Image (cartoon, rainbow, N blue to C red):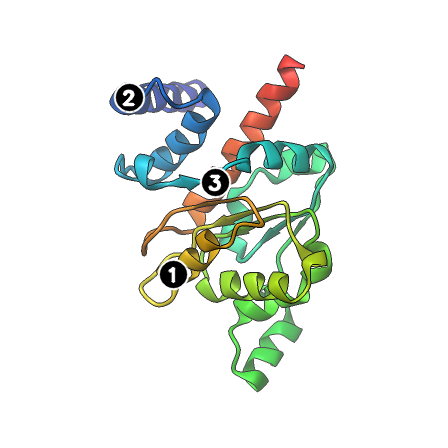
Amino acid sequence: MEILRNYIEKESFKIIDDLMDNPKLSAEEKEIRSRVVHASGDTELYWKLVISKGAIDVSVKALKSKCNIITDSRMVEAGIRKNWLKDNGNKHFCAIDRSDIFNKSEITGKTRAALAIQSLKEYLPGSIVIIGNAPTALFELLSIIREAKKYKPSLIIGMPVGFVGADTSKNSLVIQDEIPYITLPGTRGGSNLASSVFNALINIFIMRSNND
């Protein structure tokens, strides 16, 4: 069964490479874009994905420094390679389902996603933040950073999904120029796509480490 899974994945990426081949892109950038296509089944997203200048280098440096990994939802957390992170010495955090977050949301009317990010701000400096579901989490993250630069993460993977706030929150991410990011403009996104981007960054880190 494992052999079959490996065969299917290998063939899938070969098809993607044949369809989307572009000699101008680096192998590392192709890795990220191909992972998004593989996770979505949509070749159109290959070119829509936006990778800011320095985003790949920053992610490798952050992973090497054992940075924290923060996710906006358990679905994103479920998709990332947690065993690898543990072995590498990286801790991951998600507060979306904590009882205090739920209670505070009931009292304040703020979304749990926004409150969860706020509650984790002490873990933000130098981290990689993965937003794959809630636009309000991305809005809150950017607000925290504007108010206090000491909370700046190393990289933001901003890929919330939906028709209310997703596009606007990602536009807010793109117009800031202090923090490298990877995002998918528009309404599309989601936990599977966000986690696929992060897992691609892990692959790049491993490839670079093997070549050192």
- Tell me where residue 208 sits by quadrant: top right
Mark in the foreground, 2 or 1: 1
- Give the class, few, some or many, for how many residues have Cα within 10 Å of label 3's Cα (few <14, many ≥20): some
Q: Whole-percent x and y of residue 22?
A: 32, 21
For the residue pair 110 and 3, the one nearer the viewer reads as: 110
For the residue pair 191 and 45, the one nearer the viewer reads as: 45
Q: Which mark is residue 139?
A: none
**Mark 3 / mark 1, whichever is N-terminal:** 3
The amino acid on which the numbered mark 1 sits, given as a three-letter code, is Ala
The amino acid on which the numbered mark 2 sits, given as a three-letter code, is Ile
For the residue pair 70 and 184, the one nearer the viewer reads as: 184
Whether residue 159 sits left or right of residue 54 in the image: it is left
**Mark 2 / mark 1, whichever is N-terminal:** 2
Q: Whole-percent x and y of residue 59?
A: 60, 36
Image quarter in which the N terminus is found:
top left
Whether residue 198 sits left or right of residue 35 in the image: it is right
Which residue is farthest top?
Answer: 211
Label 3 close to label 2 by CB (< 8 Å) = no
Residue matched to label 1 = 166
Identify which residue is drawn at 44% across, 22% down. Answer: 26
Identify which residue is drawn at 39% across, 32% down. Answer: 33
Label 2 close to label 1 by CB (< 8 Å) = no
Whether residue 27 sits left or right of residue 72 in the image: it is left
Q: Which mark is residue 15?
A: 2
- Give the class, few, some or many, for how many residues have Cα within 10 Å of label 1's Cα (few <14, many ≥20): many
Q: Whole-percent x and y of residue 117?
A: 60, 63
Residue matched to label 3 = 52
- Tell me where residue 147 sits by quadrant: bottom right
Above or below, 101 against 126 in this view is below
The amino acid on which the numbered mark 3 sits, given as a three-letter code, is Ser
Q: CA distance from mark 2 to mark 1?
A: 30 Å
Q: CA distance from mark 3 to mark 2?
A: 26 Å
